[in-house]
Amino acid sequence: MEDKKQVLYELITDKSYRPMRFKELAVLLMVPKAEREELKQTLDALIHEGKITVDTMSRYRAADADKKTGLFHGTSRGFGFVSVEGEKEDYFIPEEETKGALNGDTVRILVQEEKSLGKRAQGRVLEIVEHGTKQIVGTYQKGKSFGFVIPDNQKFAYDVFIPKGKTAGAVEGHKVLVELTDYGDEKKNPEGEIVKVIGHINDPGVDVLSVVYAYGIPLEYPEAVYTQTERVPEEVAKEQMEGRLDLRGLLTITIDGEDAKDLDDAITLNSKGDHWELGVHIADVSEYVKEGSALDREAYKRGTSVYLVDRVIPMLPHRLSNGICSLNAGCDRLALSCLMEIDKKGNVVGHRIAETVINVDYRMTYTSVKKIIEDHDEEECASYKELVPMLLQMDELAGILREKRRKRGSIDFDFPECKIIVDGAGNPLEIKPYERDRATKLIEDFMLIANETVAEDYYWQELPFIYRTHENPDAEKIQKLGIFINNFGYSIHIGQDEIHPKELQKLLEKVDGTAEEPMIARLCLRSMKQAKYTDYCDGHFGLAAKYYCHFTSPIRRYPDLQIHRIIKENLRGKLDEKHISHYRGILPEAAKQASQTERRADEAEREVEKLKKVEYMSKKLGEVFEGVISGVTSWGMYVELPNTVEGMVRLSEMDDDYYIFDEAGYQLIGEHTRRTYKLGQKVKVEIVATDKALKTIEMLLV
């Protein structure tokens, strides 16, 4: 009996076999009909011992085969989804099967229905392993003897009960931060205590502050950080310059936006015969932020500076980011420089990474540089007569580097970003697309080549390092893209389930200027994965680069600061086995933390942007705009206006026909008129409603 049980158990749990019903097992094991009762008893014994189970389709499986642990993503409508690490598709969890799970909880689920055509796999929550949300931000509403908070996050599907005495003096309409003390269950709402009153919902700036608190972005620095910051000198001491390469004699400039205050990169360029000498000089922040110090611990925790519409929450205190670390014109500054020899074809034929001392001659703006290199503005050229020859050479070299990247397949998604102009109270006055020009691209090109050069250098030295990795897209998404673009007469070559970035680049070049360009460009972007930080070099798909890192912004990004330390220890001959072992131990977690804080910053920035766009468009009710369909769903379509504002035209409001959602074609088709609305199509819309709480803009077709 025991032998038979073992054979059966190994067969059922063997992953090379699909789950089987009783009859299929009997046939596979060639068990005669007369002996099948014994087989049934053996199977029942295995079920009794908890080694196997039977699913809803009467198939035998390993006891844990249908149980998975993952992250619960809630929705405002009660149901949710669970993402399991290593699996591409989420599991749908109906509202009655969530077991009270809240957005961000780690849960254990039982898979009840496998994925089928056009339908997700479905499961139910067995247990909440760990609660992921400790605090929430919302609006306080007062009851007779208690209060409750309506969460800002629509994915948090329950109001939070606030007992008497736990309100921190909040009144009706206050935005508050709540510490959850009881997570509730299917029958009882969560309970909490107000730990901070952010301000009244109508007070200026409270909307942005609410987003900051909701994402857990630190505003204040610990006292130890301020204490350490006070000891940081305002000027570079002479002894700090000793042993460094002195580059103060080079004509050096910074190029940034008008309102930038943390200047962490400067550039120099000289033409020498058949090659250029390009210097990319980066603020040596690691000289002032030592590993393990209070400043370092806080920078690690923050991971990145956060750029919101009306404020910046810096990774480092202003005394450093705008002071001693900022490459301000006319000041001696410590730098880590990547000095590259580049031939006329854009190849880096030699380079040196060195600790340096620099002194910036001119603090230039993108606007001014554009006037010189693109517009050839006489007045601007006269104002910067000394710089004009170097700027024109920089423009020439940047163009060569850009073309070299293009030839190897680097993908350039030139979607316009937006610039939101606000008044002193944070009210949006204007929203306009922020277009890239040759001045902004020039800096991008030089930073990219420096990042690639440094990454390749340290890859071949086989030293611990943090890389910027962009993985190849999922084969399934690329296959779907290939099928879709075939409808428009385009194709992409996919080899062995992989695609070369050059194929996507060629596709974007083919559709450039066509009616379907916005649609296909968006679908290409959606088919790609997010870039992340890793302690291994796996290449950057979007840039078609084998080696890539972030070296150029240590004032605002922790990974840059981290690799500066490694580079400096290596340059000083201190990167011995002990230090190498130390870095190999800490870098995987540092890369993970940097990726997570980057995502957090990106999401907060998008939330604030959406807030301000809704606020701005609330003054445009009744106005008509021309836009482009940017998304098509089963409940309607999204339309993007030229100023980058996006709104929704609901299917229920399209009353000229009954429209059917064609998922494969990303379009809506009228059942009677056969009228179609597809991704990338131009339409005219009227702004009919806005909701600041939901951050939505409602539109009607006109």
Image (tube, helix red, strand yellow):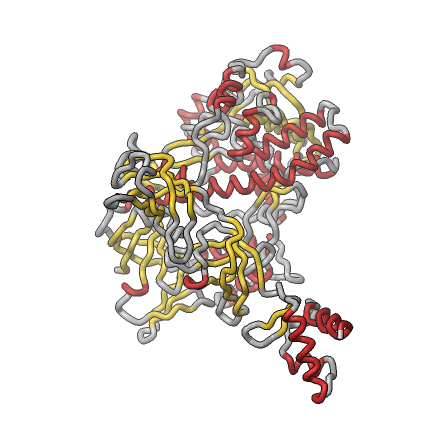
Does any portion of residue 45 appear in the rendered image? yes
- Front in this rendered view, residue 142 or 45: 45
- Front in this rendered view, residue 415 or 284: 284
Quarter of the image that includes the N terminus: bottom right
**In the image, is 232 to the left or to the right of 312?**
right
**In the image, is 462 to the left or to the right of 202?**
right
x 35%, y 47%: residue: 160
x 54%, y 53%: residue: 528
Please provide percent x and percent y for residue 661: 39, 68
- Front in this rendered view, residue 564 or 260: 564
Please provide percent x and percent y for residue 317: 48, 24
Please provide percent x and percent y for residue 665: 45, 67
Please provide percent x and percent y for residue 586: 65, 36
Relative height, residue 369 to residue 92 (above, below): above
x 61%, y 50%: residue: 471
Disc tally is 0
Does any portion of residue 443 appear in the rendered image? no
Relative height, residue 376 to residue 161 (above, below): above
Q: Quadrant of residue 333?
A: top right
x 56%, y 76%: residue: 57
Q: Quadrant of residue 482?
A: bottom right
**Outermost residue to the top:** 238
**In the image, is 209 to the left or to the right of 98?**
left
